[in-house]
Image (cartoon, rainbow, N blue to C red):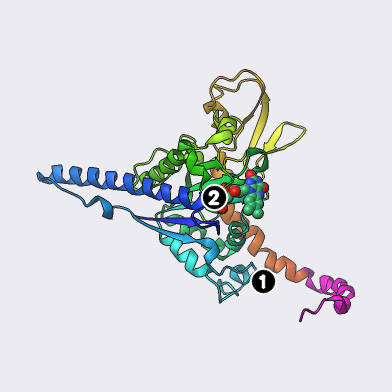
């Protein structure tokens, strides 16, 4: 089993690196345990004792994303309109994609920089169209992800974990866990044992899922443990009013009570009071609550959210790819309107 750790921080031996490495230790431990148990089972069936070398059960590797040469998407659409390949030929995106797709599980870690994950995460997520025409192929093999978000303080971390989770969902990984730890200084995260334990458990859960032994996966299955630590743990601990698909805490609320998650488009309803026992989604799991407002999500959000297989394929085929022809029809009119702006070319600063 291959588990790949992706580090989205340039800071050497910083919080992300420490916790991603801890998650890989957890993955190795769980993988070794799974291998020993599977070996014992096979041995029992064969009437012999089977000993498995525990270290070889899970192969872990690490990549610092900021060490790669990843260029911004050029918006040329050749990956979806053209021959299916990216027009940028001289960067590490194909290398990274290969590694991610070969892995059975990935641990994706990144610090929050100005309210959301460090830019390298968005740079890579923006290149998602490279895999968009291959969703079914990607889905053919089950691949799992756990994310680790480190940030300075909860009030400045609205999108750290949910956008990291979006990275995993976009590249068609099944999310098994999402850890958030608050610690500003490099390595400071290690002063709180809960952070180490949460990262370790996330890695264990990842390896167990990849070995086909996991509990129903994370947010997606709704039964996983969200290893959220620190103040975010207090916010999310009850799992109340959290998007069951991506773990997002911030929603758009419409006058009719409809609620949507901006990250994954999951649709729910805002209801007054305790929704326990309603039998659906997140709210049903949140347990008795003392009144207040609850966002209820139907269990169907796991297959209807924008990153789920069928909606995503529909979006790619019926909207993105279909826009090639509809745009072509509009092109003559657009070309005429653009002339005015084309003439303003002497405004460009020429850098020497
Ligand atoms: C440029 C920069 C911007 C940051 N912005 C935020 C922020 O908006 N919210 C927050 O909670 N922490 C912010 N932080 C704190 C980092 O998330 C925190 O230091 C984290 O532990 C860094 O992880 P690392 O050690 O793996 O690099 C920022 C740090 C830097 C360097």
State the predominant SS element of the stretch in magenta. helix
User: Which image quadrant for residue 338?
Assistant: bottom right
Q: What label does residue 186 carry, if any?
A: 2
* In front of the other: 244 or 90: 90
Quadrant where the C terminus lies?
A: bottom right
- State whether residue 263 appears in this view: no
Residue at image point 66% right, 31% down: 269
Which residue is at a point 56% across and 37% down the rendered structure image? Answer: 244
Decide which of tag 1 and tag 2 comes sooner along the chain: 1
Q: Is mark 2 within 8 Å of ligand 1?
A: yes
On the image, numbered disc 1 is attached to which residue? 76
- Give the x, y percent position of residue 286: 54, 26
Q: Quadrant of residue 127?
A: bottom right
Q: Are marks 1 and 2 in contact (CB under 8 Å)?
A: no
Which residue, as the protein is rendered here, is positioned at the far top?
A: 290
Mark 1 closeness class: few <14, some 14–19, many ≥20 residues within 10 Å: few
Rendered position, 18 above or below 322:
above
Give the CA separation, mark 1 to mark 2. 39 Å
Q: Based on the picture, tell me whether residue 336 belongs to the magenta stretch.
A: yes
> From which residue to which does the magenta span run?
330-352
Determine whether 308 is above or below 224 in the image: below
- Residue 236 lies in the magenta stretch: no
Element assignment for label 1: loop
State the image coordinates of residue 154 (x, y, percent, origin top left).
63, 38
- Residue located at (85% from left, 78% from top): 345
Side of 240 where 293 appears, left or right:
right
Mark 2 crowdedness (10 Å alpha carbons): few <14, some 14-19, many ≥20: some
Q: Quadrant of the N terminus?
A: bottom left
Where is residue 249 shown, x and y percent of the image? 63, 37
- For the question of whether residue 78 can be seen, the reply is yes
């Amino acid at each position: 089993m291959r588990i790949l750790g992706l580090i989205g921080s340039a800071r050497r031996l910083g919080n992300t690196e420490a916790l991603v490495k801890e998650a890989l230790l957890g993955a190795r431990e769980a993988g070794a345990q799974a291998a020993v148990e599977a070996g014992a089972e096979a041995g029992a069936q064969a009437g012999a004792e089977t000993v498995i070398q525990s270290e070889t059960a899970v192969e872990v590797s690490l990549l610092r994303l900021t060490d790669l040469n990843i260029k911004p998407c050029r918006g040329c659409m050749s990956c979806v309109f053209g021959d299916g390949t990216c027009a940028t030929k001289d960067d590490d995106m194909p290398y990274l994609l290969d590694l991610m797709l070969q892995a059975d599980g990935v641990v994706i870690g990144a610090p929050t920089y100005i309210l959301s994950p460090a830019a390298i995460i968005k740079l890579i997520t923006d290149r998602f169209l490279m895999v968009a025409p291959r969703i079914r192929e990607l889905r053919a093999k089950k691949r799992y992800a756990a994310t680790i978000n480190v940030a300075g303080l909860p009030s400045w971390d609205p999108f750290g974990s949910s956008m990291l989770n979006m990275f995993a969902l976009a590249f068609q990984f099944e999310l098994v866990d999402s850890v958030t730890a608050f610690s500003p200084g490099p390595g400071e995260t290690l002063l709180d044992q809960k952070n180490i334990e949460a990262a370790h458990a996330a890695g264990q859960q990842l390896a167990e899922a990849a070995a086909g032994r996991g509990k129903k996966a994370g947010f997606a299955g709704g039964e996983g443990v969200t290893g959220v630590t620190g103040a975010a743990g207090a916010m999310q601990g009850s799992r109340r009013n959290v998007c069951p698909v991506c773990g997002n805490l911030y929603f758009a609320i419409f006058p009719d009570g409809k609620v949507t998650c901006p990250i994954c488009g999951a649709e729910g309803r805002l209801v007054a009071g305790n929704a326990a026992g309603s039998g659906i989604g997140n709210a049903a799991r949140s347990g008795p609550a003392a009144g207040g407002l609850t966002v209820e999500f139907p269990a169907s959000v796991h297959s209807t959210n924008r990153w789920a297989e069928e909606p995503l394929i529909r979006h790619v085929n019926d909207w993105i790819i279909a826009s090639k022809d509809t745009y072509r029809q509009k092109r003559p009119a657009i070309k005429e309107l653009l002339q005015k702006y084309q003439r303003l070319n002497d405004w460009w600063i020429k850098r020497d």
